[in-house]
Image: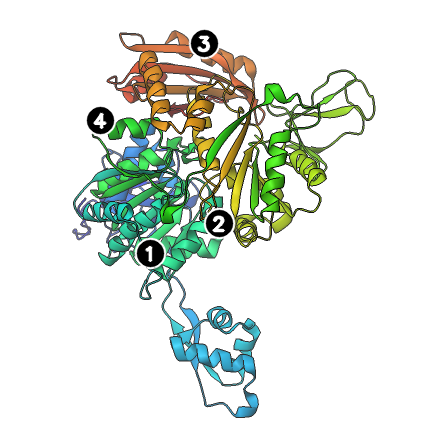
Amino acid sequence: MPGIDTSKDSSASPRRVAVMLPYPLGPYDYAVPPDLTLADGDYVRVPLGPREVLGVVWGEAKGDVAALKLKPVAGVFPAPAMPSDHRRFIEWVAAYTLSPPGAVLRMSLTAPRALEHLPPVLAFRRGAEPPRTLLTTARRRVLAALEERGTGTAVELAEAAGCSVAVVRGMADAGLLDAVRLPPRYPAAAFETPGELPSLSPDQAEAANQLKSRLGQGYSTTLLDGVTGAGKTEVYFEAIAANIAAGRQSLVLLPEIALSAQLLDRFARRFGAMPAVWHSDVGPAARRMAWRGVAEGATKVVVGARSALFLPYPDLGLIVVDEEHEAAFKQEDGVIYHARDMAVARAHLGGFPAILVSATPSLETVVNAETGRYQRLFLPARHAGAALPKIGLIDMRREKLPARQFLSPALSAAVTETLAAGEQVLLFLNRRGYAPLTLCRACGHRMQCPNCTAWLVEHRFQGLLRCHHCDHAEPIPAACPQCDNAGTFAPCGPGVERISDETRALFPEARISLLASDTLQRAFGGGPGAMQEAIRQVRDHEVDIVIGTQIIAKGHHFPMLTLVGVVDADLGLTGGDLRASERTYQLLHQVAGRAGRAERPGRVMLQTYMPEHRVMQALASDRRDAFLAVEAEERRAAGMPPYGRLAAVIVSGPDAASVGGTGRALARAAPRGEGVTVLGPAPAPLAMLRGLHRERLLLKARRDVPVQPLVAEWLGRVPVPNHVRVQVDIDPYSFL
């Protein structure tokens, strides 16, 4: 978009600009004061009611408000303008998700202090020649660090010298160091010192060359497929290195913060520096520097969660979506979008490559590769000659375990053998807490969340019953609130804490680590650093048995881990979810991939009550493609994604009658025609969530039906009460 010319005669009507605000509103028109020069994308302060708010100049004004009624732009922030590609991306996401553009813009303005002038950095350089009597061992190390780098902040010098910040400041007070003011240092702005160059296999080298050849050649999307442990990360690191050499920015999206710790370590070893990191746990100061570094074009690599996609990159040249199949890439609140699909759209709008990485790619991505929309590279073997683990099924129907026992004799024997060999074990359970359900043995009363249609989960280590949907927590009652009997509550089903108790009883000498989001908070203080320390302990063999949930299931490399036991392999196969079988296969395949990743062979044991299920048979026989072919045929026959389109409409509110009335009104106004079906309204599986009643409608359409305009017209025909909320989920992943 062209800049906005404000050089007009002062007697003429003021120039008008459209300013997009980070609210669910359209752009508003404002007058440009004669002394202010604005360009499209500038970040500005504008009046809105009694206060001033942040907005972005979105082009020429299109409204017909009288000039005298226009409020003037109050000021412009000293920051680079939002790039035109990014503004187009915001508009595209809004149109695709049927969200207000301002609501999408809000996701790009999460570090408003980064728009202000950044203060200079206080650093130190060598000062006067010190008398020998003032030189302690720590001070000598500080001076040695300065010999290498010339200048450094107090924190940088303390880290390099292995001393406290107080030592550095004391040297400055004594005149041994001179203070200097330096420009802000943005993260990932320089990769001058190369790290450890990898030794790539012929397959890896060929894949890396293919990816590098696509840089600078316009838009493309490539599926980087391959078995677990094939070295896919090292391959896309080569593409990032080439993109850095070309002076362009790169973005790596991860589905979960927990995956970042080990990836960041590998990145630092490969590149000799850390990338910028962006996710919800990054502190305000680091967010400010990362956002501004990206906006200035100085920060060259960002590793982050899905929100990193909405940073204002001026020269983005590559996006990598690691573990592209993960459902965590779908945002379910606010603007509902899938980060993988939006990443592909961002690459298309910017005219650069996207790389989707997975050992278990989603069916949508596989079909796109088969039909030629995406290119595909495959790594068939594990790196450095490691063998794939053997996967065995334990038929739990034959085990006949006692009521409170969850580890079968076969799995327990395998654990004993593995520990005797000096190797490590992972016991995987896809449930947090002690037990997924707590009930009274006297009257059958179940402890339910007061805000959600969900059972409270016992967390015995915390002494709490907790809801995993709204985080409501309450103490475990001494007596049943229904029948008033004391000591009658019993846990039903296993959680990781209960498996931990059983494992400690069976293997009292083993060093056991419990890795779930709740236990990380308690044991290590929470945050990405907690996961990093927990992973280090496992990697350095300070742990014999790991008991974990999904946070340990993917992306980690433990050379001594040779046995994976899945306690509840069937969990997730039932419930009517469109992708239940696919998700279960992906999860179990990924967790199985933690075994035997180095020179020691691995094995995997799946405890299942349905060994004949096609998911279990596909895992045991290593027939992924045959499994996906059956999934694809079933979806095609049913007209389900990726062979059809879905759009969910979720109605919620505090009053059940109003929610039900709105749902019925939407059903009466639903679109009808060839290739279009609307189901519902029906209570959502979580009919109450965070205190709100919920109903769902589902539009199902042929692949060639334009869903967005159809849904927009449909919703426009139905008045919605103020206290009822209607959300649209295009391409839904969750059906709760």
464 up-or-down from 176: above or below: above
Residue beneath disc 4: 371
Residue beneath disc 3: 664
Q: Where is residue 94 in the image (x, y as percent from the top left)?
A: 32, 32
For the residues bearing labels 1 and 4, Cβ distance under 8 angstroms: no
Q: Earlier in the sequence, mark 2 or mark 3?
A: 2
Which of these two is toward me, 671 or 523? 523
Q: Position of residue 699 (x, y in %)?
A: 36, 15
Residue beneath disc 1: 198
Horizontal side of 263 relative to 365 (left or right) equals right
Q: Earlier in the sequence, mark 4 or mark 2?
A: 4
Residue at 72 percent across and 38 percent down: it is 505
What's the CA distance linking mark 1 and mark 2?
Answer: 18 Å
Q: Position of residue 2 (x, y in %)?
A: 17, 46
| Label drawn at residue 559 | 2
Label 1, residues with CA under 10 Å away: few <14, some 14-19, many ≥20: few
Badge 4 marks a residue whose secondary structure is: loop
Quadrant of the image occupied by residue 349 = top left
Identity, as a three-letter code, of the amino acid under mark 2: Pro
- Taking the image as drawn, is residue 126 in sight? yes
Q: Which of marks 3 and 4 is in front?
A: 4
Identity, as a three-letter code, of the amino acid under mark 1: Pro
Identity, as a three-letter code, of the amino acid under mark 4: Thr
